[in-house]
Amino acid sequence: MSDNKSLWMTFGLATGTLLLFWYMDKKRNEKSEDDNGGTVTVSELNVYPIKSCAEVSVQSAMATSRGFEYDRMAQVTDKNKTYCTPREEGKRKLFHVKVVSLPTNTDEKRTLTLSSPHAEENFSLDVDGPTTTVTTKVLGSTGDQEHTLQDYGDDVATWLQKATSIPDCRLTGIGETYTRSVCVNPDQGDDVPTSAPAPVSLADEAPYLLTNASSLVDLNKRLVKNGKSAIDMRRFRPNIVVTGLQPWEEDCLSKIQIGNVQFNVWQRCGRCIMTTIDRDSLERKDGPEPLKTLTEFRERANGQRNFGMHLVPAEGCTDGKICVGDEVTILEYDEERKKEWMRLFLANA
């Protein structure tokens, strides 16, 4: 008798799980049909040539093994040869340093034009101009790491010092000998999804960050309900923004394809105090928000308050162009993360 009871319980659980999976896919398709015909698409692409500085929004970008071309190719380094970040007091003006446009294949030379409302004039940087080799600290998922970078010289340093108000800062960037690999973030605990080392630019943890527009809509509803202001996606510094998923459904993805490029959807992105800074005013208008609200429903082990997913290109994947409007094909789901998402969010979908 007990064996039959166990059999029926197992059958019931399996049936219930299948029904939930069916319902989840049905809900996503219903929502997507309102937005973009039932498909998941790329709605925004961003490149951050200088780490911790402003984004360049583009209609297309070349995806490489260590990130979009020109993404996090340089960082601002202080007089102690340590990376500069708006997390630190007095360095928020980094957010206002912007590259006007990226070089194209038709340009005679690769030039980045830097602008800032805190500098009188723009500065034109010859990416392939003379540099000096230096050893500086780079921020990674396991803390500070020393790497060999290229110093772009005194002229751009002088401009940056005026634009950022950071004394004696320098612009340092990736050279031909630069190598750095993705490594496990101990606070997230997810294994790197490739057997061979996965290269990365000067980004903290991964070559790419993907966010979901629907998740921001949901977060903003919660912020407004808590009497706080809605925020924009700039707070989360994504490379790729998608539409067509349900809120937080990005957690469930394991492998996707955009254009001819396949990505492993690796780990959730834990958020820090940088998200609390308004990108225009450089003020923390709502104090600890959005972290406080994220803590209410997105906090996991080790205090990680997550928004977005890190991507690592699949092994053997070649470089490829990705465009706004491209369809995102879901190749695989992470079944454990899918079950967790269904338990936490499906009932409210």
Image (tube, rainbow, N blue to C red):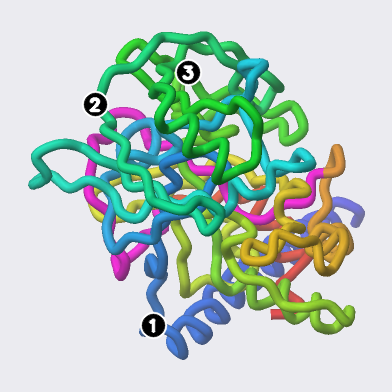
> x%, y% of residue 228?
83, 77
Residue 103 against residue 289 in the figure, above or below:
above
Label 3 element class: loop
Left/right of residue 242 with respect to residue 8 in the rendered view: left
Q: CA distance from mark 2 to mark 1?
A: 42 Å
Q: CA distance from mark 3 to mark 2?
A: 21 Å
Tag in front: 3 or 1: 3
Residue 93 in view: yes
> x%, y% of residue 201?
44, 29
From the image, tell me which residue sits under label 1: 36
Q: Residue furthest front?
A: 120
Quarter of the image where the C terminus is located: bottom right
**Quadrant hosting residue 221:** bottom right
Residue 30 against residue 345 in the figure, above or below:
below
> x%, y% of residue 93?
63, 49
> x%, y% of residue 143?
71, 22
From the image, tell me which residue sits under label 3: 180
**Hey, what amino acid is under mark 3?**
Arg
Quarter of the image where the N terminus is located: bottom right
**Hey, what amino acid is under mark 2?**
Asp
Tag in front: 3 or 2: 2
Report the disc number at residue 178: none
Name the residue at 40% across, 40% down: 71
Label 2 element class: loop
Name the residue at 72% across, 77% down: 230
In depth, the one of 193 and 173 nearer the eye is 173
